[in-house]
Every structure is written in C-alpha cells, then in structure tokens.
Amino acid sequence: MKPLALTLLLAASSSAITIAQHTTSAGSTRLTCRPKTTSHKPTGTTSAPQPCGTCPQPDVLTEVPATPGAIKAAVVPLSDEQRRGAGLPVAAWDDELARYAKGQAGLCGRGGVDNSITSSKVATAADATSYDIGAQFKDALAGDTGAADPPQRADNARIGCGVALCSAGTLIDHVQAVHFVCQYSEWTGTTSAPPPCGTCPQPDVLTTPPLTEEQVKAAVGPLSDAQRQGASLPVVAWDDALAAKARERACRFDRDSPTTIWTSRVATAALANDYPIAGDWADAVQRTAAPPANATHSKIGCALSLCRAGTVIDHVQAVVFSCEYS
C-alpha cells in the first residue's frame, strides 16, 4: 500500500500555512510546516529546513560561531586554491571588506550588493564548537561558477567574508540560520590602475578634493544638460541634498545603486591643479548608463571625494567622482 499524504489548507489569510501529514513506512506520523509562499527558502545548498512541530523552532545559538580571525584563516587558502585553479591571480584579504560582509550577512537576506557570494545553513548546537567555515565558503562558491560571477572575475583582487546569525524564520523556514557572505572588490575604477608599490599602503598625497563643491556643480551642470538633451530627455536640476548623499557614499563599498554613477582614479599631486572632470563624467556615464538615461529622473547631485589608501583602490589614495539621481 502506498504512503498516505493528506494536505489541509487552513484559513485563507496572509499568515496561512500548509500542514502536510505523512505516514512513513514504519507507520509513524510527522508534521511538516511550510509557509504559504516560498520566499524564505535557504539561499545556499548546505542544508534544508527541518521538519518541525512548533513553528518557529527556538534559536539554538546565542553567539556567531566564528571569529573574524578564524574566518580569514579558513577562507584565504580555499580562495587562493579556487583562484589559482581558475588561472586567476589570488584575491587579497581585506579586513574592511570583511566588516562590510558581516554587516550584509546580518541583514539576513533583506539586503545585499553586487559582487558578493552567500550561503546559509540551519544553525545547530554543534556549530558552537565545530562550525565548518570552509564548508560554507565552498557552498557559496558552488553557486557562482559562471565567468561573470565574483569568484571567477580577474578584476576582483580583494575579498572579505563575514558570518551572522539569523533568527528562526527570517532566512530559513522555522529555524535559526547561520548566514555567510563574502564581498569582493576590484582593484580600481576604470580610469587608472594602481602603480606598483613598495610599502603598502602608500601615503595619501592630497588633503582636499581637487575641486570645490561649487566647481563640481558648475562643471557638471552643462555636461549633464548636454547628455540629456543629446538623448532627447528633459534636463535634470541640481540638488544639494543629492550631492551630499553622493559625497557620503563615495568611499563605501555599497556605492553601486540604480540611481548612482561613479568612477575613480589614483590620486596624484598633479590632480590638485589639473583634474579632468569632463573625462571622469564621461567615464561614469559610460560605465553606468541607466541613471543618466532614465526619463523619470528630474534631479542630480554630484561630488568629488578623497578616499584613503586602500579603501577604493589598493595601496593608494583615490579620487572618486560620483553622482546621485532622483
């Protein structure tokens, strides 16, 4: 006789769940709770939600099961092995990227940026003493094997990873999860490459941006108007609040967004007297064409920022030109 499966659908509301009753070959019965939608499936492949009696199940861990030092020690050799196996230069570990990755992991699937890999697993009491960092990194790698995926990109030369705990049901149905994120970063923007260095990082060479806020505004206005008119779009008005937003985000790793354009170059002493803003504007528009071409945008604000050595371009100070649209 075939196993009997009986599915009962409870009250039709936003919180409705499906309860499936399964009779096993041994004759015992278990209940498995599933949500109405599939929006909280595991994001990695290391484990699946467990059958549950009372949903959600209580959290089993109170502390993240790995220190930043342990994560680095486990990931670096595996990352180096993966990169060399793909014929790519190894990606250097970056503590700032690791801190950022930990913050992204703590969002528990509610956020995220490009150029990262993730994996999640069901948290168990055993993880408190024997959490396998390497297994989660390998699982994250397994989901990103295409030529354009972060681990396979030759221009990704830095990596940092972090781990966070996600309460039951926030990431994996009914149970607490361990969420693992690795963030990658390029060497540079698109306008210049870092020079070979002796002592890294090299000292900063500029103390103030090459142009003042008013000079940026005066230069960008005509460039933006020409670009919009050339595309048969209404021009966008300057907005100081957007310029402040562009300035605040310039040196952060989440500067990419659907409303942002940016580019970076190595800071040199010569830029103090001869900064090519028209060239960087053109480069920013070329590398992220969508915001300038969006007909619904009516405002723009741009900024020129100095980012300390290593935060945007490895080893050296960077000048970042960025614009926000709305």
Image (spheres, helix red, strand yellow):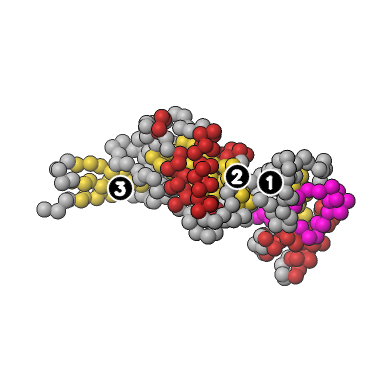
x 65%, y 62%: residue: 290
Image check: 57 left or right of 109? left
- Residue 47 position, x and y percent, is 37, 44
Q: Magenta stretch: residue 272 in it?
A: yes
Q: Which residue is mark 1?
A: 314
x 61%, y 49%: residue: 157
Label 3 Cα neighbours within 10 Å, binned few <14 / some 14-19 / many ≥20: some
Give residue 119's quadrant in the image.
top left
Q: Which type of secondary structure does the marked residue at label 3 adopt? A: strand
Magenta residues, as a range?
Answer: 259-280
Earlier in the chain: of badge 2 and badge 1, it is: 2
Marks 2,1: beta carbons within 8 A = yes
Total labels drawn: 3
In the foreground, 238 or 82: 82
Q: Could you tell me how far apart the alpha carbons at marks 3 and 2 are, in whole angstroms? A: 47 Å
Q: Which residue is mark 3?
A: 18
